């Protein structure tokens, strides 16, 4: 599915709660079809007729593949982890407001045949944007269901052609202290870095997200471009990426270098391996009252479990 990106910022009046999300999309689709038809034929039904006749989409279809409803745009953009701004989840949106996301470049290099620095507009043009509804499971045991827009990391990596020596991918977030007050905290080894094994990076689930709910990303969610690895704890899904490097050795990651016994390199969602300070067996879905069981690989085992055949998931947490 391709999307046209609005060139104007989203007004809060346009923010779509989950109930009307799909019906608005269908409304837009119907409007586009009707306009096309009207151009082709004078006896085409009017745009208004087409829209009235557009089939209503039941709100229950706005779910993930397990049938769970999407979190609201409000929730997704107001309950965030983004330590470069603040460690207070409900203040990230305010602290990140006005963060400069244009111009923006992503440097892709290291062990590749065709290193290239992409402007964000090249990435949006070069790679068709598709929608992916994914669960996000934070290592802190809360979760959401988020409709992302983006393209696969595999598509980008294939373009730069990793060499046979490339075994891992390293990612880096922008380091801009003037706009990111959290970077003053000397406790963290900035910039935020993350990594994946190359086969994990090439898996079709691994997304570079450029938007959510049909709108471009907002700063608190990692604008303009962030990683989404849905079968791993949320901290792997690094935000506001400026550098992607193919490397031979397992790269250092911010959380692993601070507390290696608490945050492993793999960080696959695993209800059977507890965090040293809390259980990972259950989670709180934002917007729900009771806890729900956490799922192995966050429910994506069918697509990814084979990546870890023969590996101990207890040792490689
Ligand atoms: N650069 C950067 N990326 C980051 C983080 C961060 O603090 N800095 N937090 C991570 C954590 S812990 C989570 S749970 C997710 C949250 O993504 P969201 O706020 O879009 O839901 O972003 C991840 N990516
Ligand atoms: Mo997280």
Image: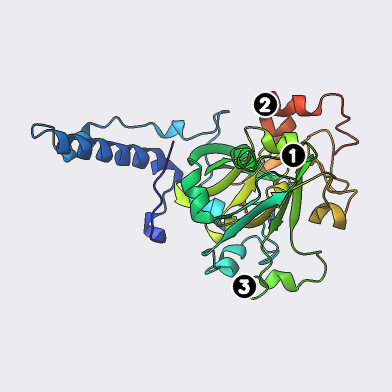
Residue sitting at x 73%, y 43%: 233
Q: Secondary structure at mark 1?
A: loop
Q: How far apart in space, not on screen, are marks 3 and 1 (Cα)?
A: 36 Å
Residue highlighted by disc 1: 163
Earlier in the chain: of badge 1 and badge 2, it is 1
Mark closest to the chain's N terminus, 2 or 3: 3
- CB of mark 1 within 8 Å of CB of mark 2? no
Return the x and y of residue 167 as percentages of the image width and height: 79, 39
Residue occupied by mark 3: 179
Helix, strand or loop under label 3: loop
| Nearer-the-camera pick, 154 or 86 | 154
Q: Is residue 12 above or below residue 44?
A: below
Q: Secondary structure under badge 2?
A: helix
The N terminus sits in image quarter = top left
> Mark 2 highlights which residue?
303
Q: Position of residue 84 (x, y in %)?
A: 69, 65
Is residue 294 in view from this perspective?
no
- Residue furthest to the front in view is 113
> Going from the N terminus, do you reach mark 3 or mark 1 first?
1
Quadrant placement of the C terminus: top right
């Amino acid at each position: 599915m391709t999307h046209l990106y609005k060139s104007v910022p989203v007004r809060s009046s346009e923010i779509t709660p989950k109930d009307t999300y799909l019906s608005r999309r269908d409304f837009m689709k119907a409007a586009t079809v009707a306009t096309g038809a009207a151009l082709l034929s004078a006896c085409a039904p009017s745009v208004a007729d087409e829209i009235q006749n557009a089939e209503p989409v039941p709100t229950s279809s706005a779910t993930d593949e397990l049938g769970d409803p999407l979190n609201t745009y409000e929730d997704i953009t107001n309950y965030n982890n983004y330590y470069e701004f603040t460690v207070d989840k409900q203040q990230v949106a305010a602290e990140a407001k006005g963060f400069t996301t244009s111009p923006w470049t992503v440097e892709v290099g290291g062990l590749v045949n065709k290193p290239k620095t992409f402007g964000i507009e090249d990435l949006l043009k070069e790679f068709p944007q598709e929608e992916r509804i994914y669960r996000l499971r934070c290592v802190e045991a809360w979760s959401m269901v988020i409709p992302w827009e983006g393209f696969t990391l595999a598509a980008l990596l294939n373009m730069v052609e990793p060499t046979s020596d490339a075994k891992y991918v390293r990612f880096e977030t922008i380091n801009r202290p003037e706009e990111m007050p959290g970077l003053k905290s000397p406790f963290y080894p900035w910039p935020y870095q993350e990594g994946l094994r190359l086969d994990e990076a090439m898996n079709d689930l691994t997304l570079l997200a450029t938007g959510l709910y049909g709108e471009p990303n907002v700063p608190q969610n990692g604008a303009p471009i962030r990683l989404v690895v849905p079968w791993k704890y949320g901290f792997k899904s690094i935000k506001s990426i400026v550098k992607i490097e193919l490397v031979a050795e397992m790269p250092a990651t911010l959380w692993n270098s601070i507390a290696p016994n608490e945050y492993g390199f793999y960080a696959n969602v695993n209800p059977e391996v507890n965090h040293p300070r809390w259980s990972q067996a259950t989670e709180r879905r934002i917007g729900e009252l009771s806890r729900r069981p956490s799922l192995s690989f966050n429910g994506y085992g069918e697509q990814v479990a084979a990546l870890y055949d023969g590996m101990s998931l207890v040792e490689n947490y």
